Amino acid sequence: MTSIDTLRPIGWNGITLSCPTKWETFVSGHNHLLFEEDFRPIFELRWQKSATDKKTPTDPILRNLHREAGLYGQQSVPTAWQQIEKNYEIIPLADKQSDEPKGALLSCRHCNTSLLLYFFSPRAIQRQELQQTLSSLNCHTPAEEDTLWAIQDFQIRIPDRFQLSSHSFAASLTRLSFTDSGLTMHICRLAQASLRLQTTSLADLMVHLSGTEVPETEIVLSSHTASHSNHPSIFRQILTRFKRKPPFHWMTLRHHPEHDRLSGLFLENKKPIPEEQAISILNSYENLSL
């Protein structure tokens, strides 16, 4: 049996699960994850949250799957799915030509989210590791908790009202952007921090990542942190808006020598930024050892 010590959390846009650390997780879209092992795909997961309290009809989804992917819904649920069935209504999917199992259409019994699983091997669902992973699948966060975002080697908790606007996984630089009304938030993760800091200071890296010019004398520096926040006068606010830049910002870039990582949090708004909220999000930002 796979030990819980070999699992790691994954959180992406409202979906959480635990998968083996030897698996690679790739973000293919706002609502699409792909899982691989040794460069071989295992399964992919897509989901859609219902815009209303009503359950999303499955018949149109099944018709599309049959027409576009040659899949059809089966009546009986395999024994391997029993642990998952307590939280989800399950329609197993099979290939119409070979009759081999290919995936499943899941409907959450609590929040009406629809999830589509596709397996790249007909025997994938028999793998105990995959059964454990799917048993940990969750598509809604308790009202009193912030949403978990956990990908690559970091995790952070963000209030549910923040909506993912864009994401980028460039070489050694991950950037996630969120919006909440007029507030924009960027989360950055940079690898190989030691190499970057050989040629560029922590303060200069923070300014570069934020895209906001900051007087060097106003940057607050400690041994492994650079930060800056502003409270501009009315005149400065008007001047900044003429330049189409939000007048208020709050930014921090931290160096984690033990992980050779840099983690950044950048917020900007037309209104003052609640510092308590920014600090709470920053404190939840963790680097993981994989």
Image (cartoon, rainbow, N blue to C red):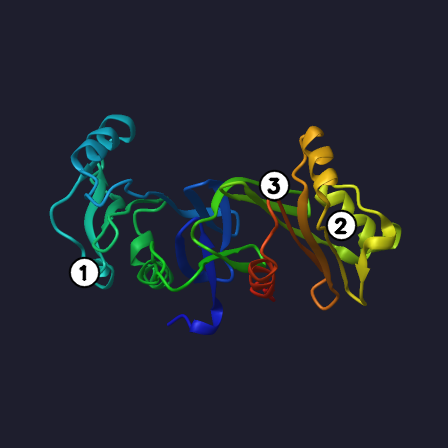
Q: Residue at x 84, y 47 (%)?
A: 215
Residue 290: quarter of image: bottom right
Disc 3, disc 2: CB below 8 Å? no
Horizontal relation, residue 101 to residue 206: left or right: left
Q: Residue at x 22, y 45 (%)?
A: 53
Mark positioned earlier in the residue sequence (3 or 1)? 1
193 w.r.t. 112: above or below = below
Q: Identify the secondary structure beneath mark 2.
A: helix
Q: Identify the secondary structure beneath mark 1.
A: helix
State the separation of the CA atoms marked 3 and 2: 21 Å
Residue identifier under label 3 = 270
Q: Residue 206 carries which label?
A: 2
Disc 2 residue type (three-letter): Met
Q: Identify the secondary structure beneath mark 3.
A: loop
State the separation of the CA atoms marked 3 and 1: 55 Å
Q: Which residue lies furthest to the left in this view?
A: 75
User: Within 10 Å of the Cα at label 3, are there few (<14), some (14-19), or many (20+) other Cα atoms?
Assistant: some
- Which numbered disc, 1 or 2, marks the residue closer to the eye? 2
Residue identifier under label 1 = 79
Residue nearer the viewer, 146 or 115: 146
Residue 177 in picture, x, y percent from top left:
56, 43
- Which numbered disc, 3 or 1, marks the residue closer to the eye? 3
Q: Residue at x 73, y 45 (%)?
A: 233
